[in-house]
Amino acid sequence: MNEPIVARHWLALTAPKAAPAVATSTVLILGRIWNANGAEHSVGNAALMVVLAAGAAAAGAFASAGRAGDPVIAGTAFASSGGLALAGVAGYADGLPLPLLLWALATAVAYALAARYWRTDRRESLAHERHTAQRHEEHGHIERVEALRAGAQIEVARSGAAYAEQLAQALTARAALPGFDPAQLTRAGLPELPATAHTFEITKES
């Protein structure tokens, strides 16, 4: 019933924690590459990024509205909107201060949102571990009870077999005594031997 304990690699543990910073840094780097390739002060490119960012934000707002809203789709849409806005600013601005400021802000917001999901996932994992441990304890208790019951049944069977063997030996020893007569014992009022024992005695005497 004991499950093997698997130690996760440190990269598997730290990768989810670094994902928000890696995502925002990648957007910033791509935006600056775009800036170096002609996007700086390009009104058309800036307008395109504004339209895309606004469209993603609107999609997130529609996805989160109402009781049937999907939080996963809404979060993805808002994240896309923020990434597009950061990429637009990083590509249009002529210096690094404003893109770095927006990068820091976007990273902080990403970690704030991710921390909420990490806490929820942690609570669910702890609840699952407690449920699994409780189930293992219940199964272990049942197994111990069944083992004790089986052991008791085996001991009872052994006791019965030993008693039957001792009874057979006693009957054999009594039948071997000189002058043993089952009919005389019956006339004296003693209990009569079972038919199987009497047949065994007659067979032995013959």
Image: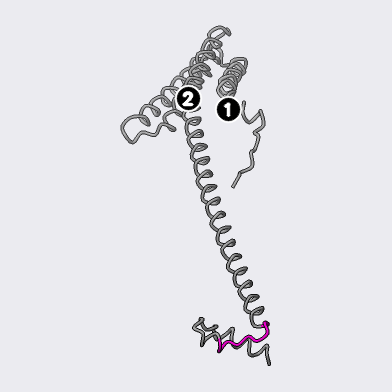
Amino acid found under the numbered disc labelled 2? Ala
Q: Name the dominant secondary structure of the magenta segment.
A: loop
> Residue at (49%, 15%) from the top-left corner?
43
The quarter of the rendered structure image containing the C terminus is bottom right
The relative height of residue 5 versus residue 19 in the rendered view (above or below) is below
The relative height of residue 2 versus residue 79 in the rendered view (above or below) is below
List x then y, in percent, for residue 150: 56, 59
> Residue at (55%, 83%) from the top-left corner?
193
Residue 79 is labelled as: 2
Amino acid found under the numbered disc labelled 1? Pro
List x then y, in percent, for residue 186: 52, 86
The region drawn magenta spans 176-184
Please indicate whether residue 31 sits to the left or right of residue 43 in the image: right
Q: Are marks 1 and 2 in contact (CB under 8 Å)?
A: no
Density class for disc 1 (Cα within 10 Å; few <14, some 14-19, many ≥20) is few
**Secondary structure type for disc 2:** helix
The picture quadrant where one finds residue 197 is bottom right
Q: Is residue 53 rendered magenta in the image?
A: no
Q: Which residue is mark 1?
A: 16
Mark toward the start of the polypeptide (1 vs 2): 1
The relative height of residue 12 versus residue 53 in the rendered view (above or below) is below
> Residue at (41%, 29%) from the top-left corner?
74
